[in-house]
Image (cartoon, rainbow, N blue to C red):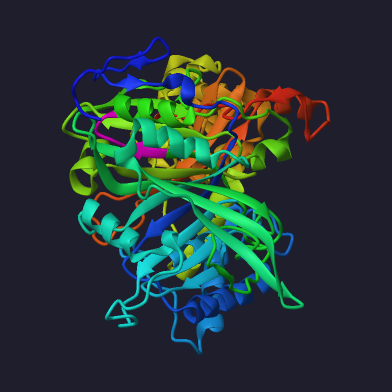
Amino acid sequence: PGPSPQVCCNDCNIDHLGHCNLFHMADDTTSFQFHHVQVFVNHVKPLEEYKKLEDRLNALARKGKFNPFSGLKGFLEPGEHEDRVKEGKSAWEEVCKDSGVLPETFQSSGQDIVEQLLVGLGWRVTAEYDGVGTRSVLVTSADPCGVKMCITAARTDGHNENQQEQEPYAHFSSDHVKRKAEAHNGRQCIGVLGFEVSKGSLEGILGRYRKLHPNLLVQDIIHQYKDTRTVNQHSIDLGTMKVFEVFAYYKNTVSRIADTGTVLRFVERDGTFSSRPGFSNPEGVLPGLRDADPHFDDTSIPAYSDHWVSNVQDRVGFLETLKDTLGFVPKVEFNAGVVAAGRAQIESTVVGNSNAPPSSTQAEALKNQSQVYLPVNNALSDVGHVHSFLQQLGQGVQHLASRVVDLVSFVERVNNYREMTGRGFSFLSIPRSYYGILRTMDLVAAGASQALAAALVERLQEEGVVSKDGVVDLSLSASRLANITVGGDQLQAEWEEKHGALAGAVLRGRYKNIFNLLGDSIEESLYLQIVRNQILIDVQGGDILFQIFTCKILQADPEHEAPFLEFIQRLCSECRDAADQDATDVCRVPIKAGCGGVGGWDFL
């Protein structure tokens, strides 16, 4: 393959560079599922260190009162929060008193991603690989169907220093580590996106890459691993896993030179390698992994892959490669195209498979991994995150988005644990004005005269419960408002006469913007939790999307660009309508994946 145009048969299509692309070859009967991601880091600690941290976290959870998932406790009320966090810190200090590990001031950079997942999300190291040239740990929630993150680093203990031994598993080869470091300027990265495909599909995918994109092949081979047992001196194959890898992007689509920084991995499982309880070989994720005896506390929050986002130089070229080889096509139902924020401007397209079955229940929609969505961004300006990411790290995975059943509870749990332990994750800071402000016109609309509205706003500002910009203190209560007076007998009389409506307008100012989107569909307490935990809201039709973004992960220096994580909750209109009729887990019609879109913030 090269840059010159080719003569094509009638069944071929000429792409934007003149290449002959056999679109019809991509088999749309192949089923795809999110399977795992592999993250490449500078160092993985010994397993026993992570297990000691898990034991301390389990001991903290047994105390049963420091997060919304333990001890049957509810959310932290605003007045309780500070005292409860102090209690939690004391409990953590007690748990850690003999270990030398004490609460510390949180810093988002320089973190160990494994420890962040253990503390922040309550996940556990469920399997490990101790190889010739690399070490890996698998970190997951308690649900083996959920997100699976394999964290890999080169060995630094001098083992196999003379490189006399070969790594028995290609997916754990030190070549992966070296390629990722070279392609991403030595930065830690999300280097492999892993998909499970239906039985008998790998050969077809390999054939299409051989014919149309041979330069993207990591190796021109499908690796096959068998679970072989010996019974009465006879060998019996109980299961098989096949693994095939390609480079995701071209450095330059015209010259067809592969960018070696990111790999797409396809796995096909059969027999004892098929999905079943457990995380290790031969019962789960990748050959070579061995169970690490995980013990989950009752705060572990399952999460399920929803979409994986790439930043690339040639978006159109990558989309064409995915269509040629996998049959993935753009998803027009998502709000993409050109997106701008200030001077930062990008172009984005969401691409994915087209044969995923719909879900009929909320639980099924949460856990269903068969709809793959891959948003793809390219920069259109020389400012902004996408441009900086490409400049510093090169092409690669910008972020991983995962679904949870209750995003408000999830974020509150992460925030509480970060404040108590000094570890875990922090989230992007969202200005309070995003959620709503109080203006004099809001009070006029609620029935106040212009004079009373102006006087009341001024009085609330004097009391320190409304800022000069109109941001209303979240802790403001109806009882405190009842004790506020305004100057002048006439204005005071009007304030007392219309107090109910006007107090309601003041309190609603804390979340007015999102109330205008969601109305009375959720209670005030949930609105306040959304604001307090800085959750973003997007609405498409009757579907609602809750989303939040962590600060950057895998970041050695706070000035460096780096990937991040996103967590979302989808409230599909079909299921919300059913819930109103007390059918809490049955949707009135089958629902397609992706209800509520991916949100405008996702592209920036």
Residue at the extreme front: 234
At a point 33% along the width and 80% down the height, the residue shown is 160
Front one among 304 and 531: 304
Residue 464 as seen in the image, left or right of residue 513: left
Image-based side of 586 in relation to 537, left or right? right
325 falls in the magenta region: no
Does the magenta-highlighted stretch encompass residue 311? yes
Q: Residue at x 40, y 57 (%)?
A: 39
Image quarter for residue 72? bottom right
Task: Return the residue nearer the eye: 136 or 595.
Answer: 136
Residue 201 seen in render: yes
Magenta span of residues: 309-314
Q: Is residue 487 visible?
A: no
- From the viewer's perspective, is 363 left or right of 38? right
User: In the image, what residue occupies the spot 57% across and 29% down?
Assistant: 594
* In the displayed structure image, the side of residue 419 where residue 154 appears, left or right: left
Residue 221 place in picture, x, y as percent: 43, 49
Task: Estimate the x, y position of residue 355 in percent, counting from the top left.
Answer: 61, 26
Q: Nearer the viewer, residue 295 or 600?
A: 295
Location of the N terminus (image quadrant): top left
Question: Which residue ends up furthest to the left in the rendered image?
Answer: 382
**Callout count:** 0
* Image spot of residue 273 (x, y percent): 65, 57
Expressed as whole percent of the image width and height from the top left, the position of residue 345 reads 25, 26
- Which residue is situated farthest in the right direction here? 582
When asked about the image quadrant of residue 28, the answer is top right
What residue appears at the point 58 percent right and 55 percent down from the top-left corner?
241
